[in-house]
């Protein structure tokens, strides 16, 4: 009996707290690959990040997409940019300078972590989230550059050379940010945000330095870098637009002018033809009139002259 009791005490019960583990791959363009169907209701197939949040994480763990200029950047940035433009942010005075509501920003952050951007967001909150995303990166976009080399830049050409040292991921992020600022500077007469103003508000978010004094001095140089690159981008846009072939891109007004000109030319030709017809008719009338005058003149010759002519014919 004792042995039987020992065997019963050693019996293993049914397993509890079972955890099913599935190994999946997170593709930065297509989301989770190999995700079991039972997980799909709780886990979106294309989350904005493999992490629990889209803020404060490396771009290597985030879903990526290409913008209109070919920059490969996190989808969260293109999503915020598109909504910012759709809500008329380009024409809002003080955009990126005025801060949004903090309580609303926290709610939007939670929704963005799910890959959702709610409707009716305050325009300044959208702009602030873009700056916050850059500011909270584990490593600043420009931190891979040699700080001494950045500090020694004195001209636009110097800044262009130094940013060529950036890795591809950081170079794409910087190019995206520069073109974003250039878009808003094109409306500076309305939003009051010049290239200097935008560079001033973006500079502190593009690098991270521990020493406050060094960080302040470096931020001033980063501001100069952003301003120079933004001005360069705006000049290149103007040159590109001025080099467009006018023959291939005629405006409707120009087409209308050509059409009017053609109509006037046709009317002029018709007028000339009518004038030619009138001249011919006048010439015929003159000839007919001359013949009539000749006949009348013959009819009214004196009889003596007629007799003299008859005598001459008889003598001959």
Image (cartoon, grey):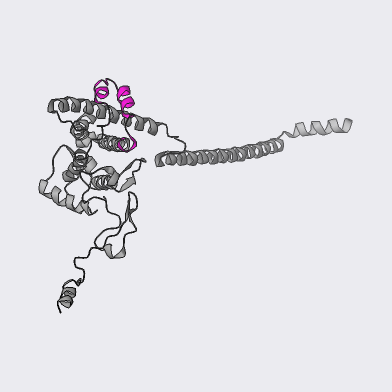
Would residue 23 be found to the left or right of residue 102 on screen? right
Image x and y of residue 142, in percent: 26, 32
Q: Residue furthest front?
A: 2
The quarter holding residue 180 reads: top left
The quarter holding residue 22 reads: bottom left
Is 85 magenta? The answer is: no
Is 146 magenta? The answer is: yes
| Stretch of the chain drawn in magenta | 143-170
Would residue 25 be found to the left or right of residue 117 on screen? right
Would residue 283 be found to the left or right of residue 120 on screen? right
Residue at the spot 24% in from the left edge and 30% down from the top edge:
195
Q: Residue furthest right?
A: 316
Quadrant of the frame with the C terminus: top right
Residue 77, compared with residue 142, is above or below; it is below
Image x and y of residue 268, in percent: 52, 38
Whether residue 78 appears in this view of the structure is: no
Image x and y of residue 148, in percent: 24, 22
Image x and y of residue 159, in percent: 30, 25
Front residue (pair 282, 274):
274
Whether residue 150 appears in this view of the structure is: yes
Front residue (pair 137, 238):
137
Front residue (pair 25, 132):
25
Front residue (pair 219, 101):
219
The quarter holding residue 176 reads: top left
Quadrant of the frame with the N terminus: bottom left
Would residue 253 be found to the left or right of residue 159 on screen? right
């Amino acid at each position: 009996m004792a042995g039987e009791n020992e065997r019963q005490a050693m019996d293993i019960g049914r397993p509890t707290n079972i955890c099913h583990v599935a190994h999946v791959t997170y593709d930065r363009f297509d989301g989770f690959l190999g995700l079991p169907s039972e997980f799909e209701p709780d886990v979106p197939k294309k989350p904005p990040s493999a992490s629990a949040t889209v803020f404060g994480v490396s771009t290597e763990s985030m879903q990526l997409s290409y913008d209109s200029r070919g920059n490969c950047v996190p989808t969260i940035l293109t999503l915020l940019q598109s909504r910012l433009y759709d809500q008329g942010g380009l024409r809002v005075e003080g955009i990126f300078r005025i801060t949004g509501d903090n309580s609303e920003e926290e709610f939007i952050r939670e929704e963005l972590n799910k890959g959702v951007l709610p409707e009716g967001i305050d325009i300044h909150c959208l702009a602030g989230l873009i700056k916050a995303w850059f500011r909270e990166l584990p490593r600043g976009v420009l931190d891979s550059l040699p700080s001494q080399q950045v500090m020694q830049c004195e001209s636009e050409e110097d800044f262009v050379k130094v940013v060529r040292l950036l890795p591809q991921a950081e170079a794409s992020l910087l190019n995206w940010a520069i073109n974003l600022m250039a878009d808003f500077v094109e409306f500076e007469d309305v939003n009051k945000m010049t290239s200097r103003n935008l560079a001033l508000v973006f500079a502190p978010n593009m690098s991270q330095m521990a020493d406050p004094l060094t960080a302040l001095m470096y931020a001033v140089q980063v501001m100069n870098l952003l301003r120079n690159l933004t001005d360069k981008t705006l000049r290149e846009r103007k040159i590109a637009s001025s080099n467009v072939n006018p023959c291939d891109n005629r405006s409707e007004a120009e087409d209308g002018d050509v059409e009017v000109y053609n109509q006037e030319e046709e009317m002029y030709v018709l007028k000339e033809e009518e004038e030619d017809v009138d001249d011919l008719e006048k010439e015929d009338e003159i000839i007919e009139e001359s013949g009539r005058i000749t006949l009348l003149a013959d009819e009214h010759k004196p009889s003596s002259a007629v007799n003299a002519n008859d005598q001459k014919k008889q003598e001959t």
